[in-house]
Image (cartoon, grey):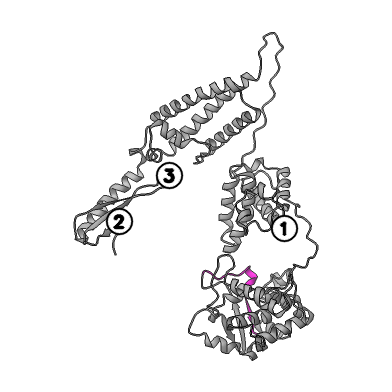
C-alpha cells in the first residue's frame, strides 16, 4: 500500500502530498511535490523526511507565530484609530440608552470569555483587524489563541473608554452640590456555563444510552432553548420568568415547522406569529418541557447552572380528538384479514405488504420492528417459533427502548397461513423484507406505512382519522385485554416496560415463551 503522503502519477513518478492547515476562510489546499523517482523505497525515504519537517513546523507554532509585543502593538494601533471614530460620533450624535446597554453587555461577554479562557471569535472584528494591520489568515492561525485573546482585551478596553465618555455626557458637574453616595455594586452572578456548550456536554453524556433517532429528537427539543436564548446565554441568567416565556413559545409553535420549507427557514420568534397553522399538541409540548427539566436538573448537578427550572410546568392534555390512534373494530379487522389472505380486490401486490401487515396484526410489533427483521430473527425454541426483535447486527437496526428487545411467539394463524414457507423462500438473502429501504427519519418502515395508510386502507374504504398501521398494535393490545390476558404478559408481547416491584425485581426475567405463546394464541380476528 502507498503511504498516505505518496501518490503515483500516470507516468510512474512518485509525488509527495502535504495538507496546508485550514485558513480563516475555511479553505484548505494541498502542496504536491515531485520526488523525481520511480523507486518506491527511495520515494518512501524522501516522503518520511518531508513529513517529519512538516510536522515539526505544524506542531511548533512558536516558529511561525508573532511575538506578543508585536501583536499588542498592532491591536493597540487598530483600536486607537477606532476610538477616534467612536469619540467623534459620540460628540456629534450621542448614544441611545439601548446602545449604552449593548456596550455594557458586550463588555461583560468579553470578560466572561477571558475568565473562562474560551476560544471563540464572538464579537471580534477578525477580518477587519487582519486587513488594517496587514496580517494574513495564516498569521492569525499561527498566533492563535494569543492573538485572539489580545484582540478581545483591546475590544473590551476600547468599549470601556467609550462607555466612560458616554456616561460623562449623561451628567453635569456642580462643585457646590452635596455628594451622593454611590449605589452598592450589583452582586456578581454565580458561576455558570453558556447554554450552547452545556447542551453539547449534556447530549454527549447521554448519547450512549439514547438511540440515534432519540438523539436527533432530543437535540431538536433543546435547540428551541438555544434559538430563544442564544448559545452564549449564561445558564445563571435564565430564571423562572424566562422558562414561563419559553412555555408560551411552545404553545404557539406550528406543528408543521419542520416539514414546510417556508416555516423551516423562519426564525423562532417569527414562525410562532405565522397565522393559519395548527399548533403542536399538548403531548409534544410536554415532551419538550420534560427534556428541558431533565437538562436543567443535569446542569445543576454538574455545576453548569446554580438552579433547576421547568419543574411542574407541563400543560394539560388535549381533549380526545378523532386523530388519536385507535384500534380497528372487529369488522374492520376481518375485512383487512380477508383482503390480505384472499386478495379479493387485488390491492396486495407484494408478499412484503401481505406478511408485513399480518405480522402487525398477529404480534402487535411496531412498524419499524417488523420491516427491519432479518431472516435469522425468525427462530425456533423446541416446538415454538418466534420473532427475535432486537437491535443487534446491522447498525441501522433499532428498538424504541430496553423493553423493546423481546421474543414474540408466532401466532398459530401465521404458521397456518404459510409464514414459515415465506421465510424459507427468502433464505438466499439476509433481510426478511429487502425491498424496504432504510431512511434516517423513519427507519425501514416508511414504505410499508405509506402503502398501508395512503393506499390500502383508503381503497378498502375504512381510512379514518386515527386509523393507521399503528392501529394494528392498538388492536392487539385491546383484543388480548378483552381475552383476559394479564397486562404484564401483554406488555412483554408488545415491548412495553413492566412496572412495579413484583415485575421489575421479582419477575425480572419475564415470562417463558410457552406462557407468551399461550397468551398470543388467545388473539382472534
Instruction: Name the residue furthest bottom.
Output: 416
Q: Residues within 10 Å of mark 3 (few under 14, many from 20)?
A: few
Task: For the residues labelled 3 and 1, say whether their Cβ atoms are less than 8 Å apart.
Answer: no
Q: Where does the magenta region start and end? A: 395-410
Instruction: Name the residue furthest top.
Output: 176
Q: Residues within 10 Å of mark 2 (few under 14, many from 20)?
A: some
Which sits earlier in the primary sequence, circle 2 or circle 3?
A: 2
- The residue indicated by pointer 2 is 5
Q: Position of residue 420 (x, y in %)?
A: 58, 88
The residues tagged by marks 3 and 1 sit, at their Cα atoms, a distance apart of 42 Å
Q: Position of residue 260 (x, y in %)?
A: 62, 58
Q: How many marks?
A: 3
- Badge number at residue 25: 3
Determine whether the residue tagged by mark 2 lies in a helix, strand or loop. loop
- The residue indicated by pointer 1 is 278
The residues tagged by marks 2 and 3 sit, at their Cα atoms, a distance apart of 25 Å
Task: For the residues labelled 2 and 3, say whether their Cβ atoms are less than 8 Å apart.
Answer: no
- Badge number at residue 149: none
Determine whether the residue tagged by mark 3 lies in a helix, strand or loop. loop
Q: Position of residue 205 (x, y in %)?
A: 57, 55
Res 519 seen here: no
Determine whether the residue tagged by mark 1 lies in a helix, strand or loop. loop
Res 361 seen here: yes
| Of labels 2 and 1, the one closer to you | 1
Which sits earlier in the primary sequence, circle 2 or circle 1?
A: 2
Q: Residues within 10 Å of mark 1 (few under 14, many from 20)?
A: few
- Quadrant assignment, res 492: bottom right
Along the viewing direction, whichever of 282 and 449 lies nearer the viewer? 449
**The N terminus lies in quadrant:** bottom left
Image-based side of 391 in relation to 177, left or right: left
Which sits earlier in the primary sequence, circle 3 or circle 1?
A: 3
- Quadrant assignment, res 358: bottom right
Amino acid at each position: 500500500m502507498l503511504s498516505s503522503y505518496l501518490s503515483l502519477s500516470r507516468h510512474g513518478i512518485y509525488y509527495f502530498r502535504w495538507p496546508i492547515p485550514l485558513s480563516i476562510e475555511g479553505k484548505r489546499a494541498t502542496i504536491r511535490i515531485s520526488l523525481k523517482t520511480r523507486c518506491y523505497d527511495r520515494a518512501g525515504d524522501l516522503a518520511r523526511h518531508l513529513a517529519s519537517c512538516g510536522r515539526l513546523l505544524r506542531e511548533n507554532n512558536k516558529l511561525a507565530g508573532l511575538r506578543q509585543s508585536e501583536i499588542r502593538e498592532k491591536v493597540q494601533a487598530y483600536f486607537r484609530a477606532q476610538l477616534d471614530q467612536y469619540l467623534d460620533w459620540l460628540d456629534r450624535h450621542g448614544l441611545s440608552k439601548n446602545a449604552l446597554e449593548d456596550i455594557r453587555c458586550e463588555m461583560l461577554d468579553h470578560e466572561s470569555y477571558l475568565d473562562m479562557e474560551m476560544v471563540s471569535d464572538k464579537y471580534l472584528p477578525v477580518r477587519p483587524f487582519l486587513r488594517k494591520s496587514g496580517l494574513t489568515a495564516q498569521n492569525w492561525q499561527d498566533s492563535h489563541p494569543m492573538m485572539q485573546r489580545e484582540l478581545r482585551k483591546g475590544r473590551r478596553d476600547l468599549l470601556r473608554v467609550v462607555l466612560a465618555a458616554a456616561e460623562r455626557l449623561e451628567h453635569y458637574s456642580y462643585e457646590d452640590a452635596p455628594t451622593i453616595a454611590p449605589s452598592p455594586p450589583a452582586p456578581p452572578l454565580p458561576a455558570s456555563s453558556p447554554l450552547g456548550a452545556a447542551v453539547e456536554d449534556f447530549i454527549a453524556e447521554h448519547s450512549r444510552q439514547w438511540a440515534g433517532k432519540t438523539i436527533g429528537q432530543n437535540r431538536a427539543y433543546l435547540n428551541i432553548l438555544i434559538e430563544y436564548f442564544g448559545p452564549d446565554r449564561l445558564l445563571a441568567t435564565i430564571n423562572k420568568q424566562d422558562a414561563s416565556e419559553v412555555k408560551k413559545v411552545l404553545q404557539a409553535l406550528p406543528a408543521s415547522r419542520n416539514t414546510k420549507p417556508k416555516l423551516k427557514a423562519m426564525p423562532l420568534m417569527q414562525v410562532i406569529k405565522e397565522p393559519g397553522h395548527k399548533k403542536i399538541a399538548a403531548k409534544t409540548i410536554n415532551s419538550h418541557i420534560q427534556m428541558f427539566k431533565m437538562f436543567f436538573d443535569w446542569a445543576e448537578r454538574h455545576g453548569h447552572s446554580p438552579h433547576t427550572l421547568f419543574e411542574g410546568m407541563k400543560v394539560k392534555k388535549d381533549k380526545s380528538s378523532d386523530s388519536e390512534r385507535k384500534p380497528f373494530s372487529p369488522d374492520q379487522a376481518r375485512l383487512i384479514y380477508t383482503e390480505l389472505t384472499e386478495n379479493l380486490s387485488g390491492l396486495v401486490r407484494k408478499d412484503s405488504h401481505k406478511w408485513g401487515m399480518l405480522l402487525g396484526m398477529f404480534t402487535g410489533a411496531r412498524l419499524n420492528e417488523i420491516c427491519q427483521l432479518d431472516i435469522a430473527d425468525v427462530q425456533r425454541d423446541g416446538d415454538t417459533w418466534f420473532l427475535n426483535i432486537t437491535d443487534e447486527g446491522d447498525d441501522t437496526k433499532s428498538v424504541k427502548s430496553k423493553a423493546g428487545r423481546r421474543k414474540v411467539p408466532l401466532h398459530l394463524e401465521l404458521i397456518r397461513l404459510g409464514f414459515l414457507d415465506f421465510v424459507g423462500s427468502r433464505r438466499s438473502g439476509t433481510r426478511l423484507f429487502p425491498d424496504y429501504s432504510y431512511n434516517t427519519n423513519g427507519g425501514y418502515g416508511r414504505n410499508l406505512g405509506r402503502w398501508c395508510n395512503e393506499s390500502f386502507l383508503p381503497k378498502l374504504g375504512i381510512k379514518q382519522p386515527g386509523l393507521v398501521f399503528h392501529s394494528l398494535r392498538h388492536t392487539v393490545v385491546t383484543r388480548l385485554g378483552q381475552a383476559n390476558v394479564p397486562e404484564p404478559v401483554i406488555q412483554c408481547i408488545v415491548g412495553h416496560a413492566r412496572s412495579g416491584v413484583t415485575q421489575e425485581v421479582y419477575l425480572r426475567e419475564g415470562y417463558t415463551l410457552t406462557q407468551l405463546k399461550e397468551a398470543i394464541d388467545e388473539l382472534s380476528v
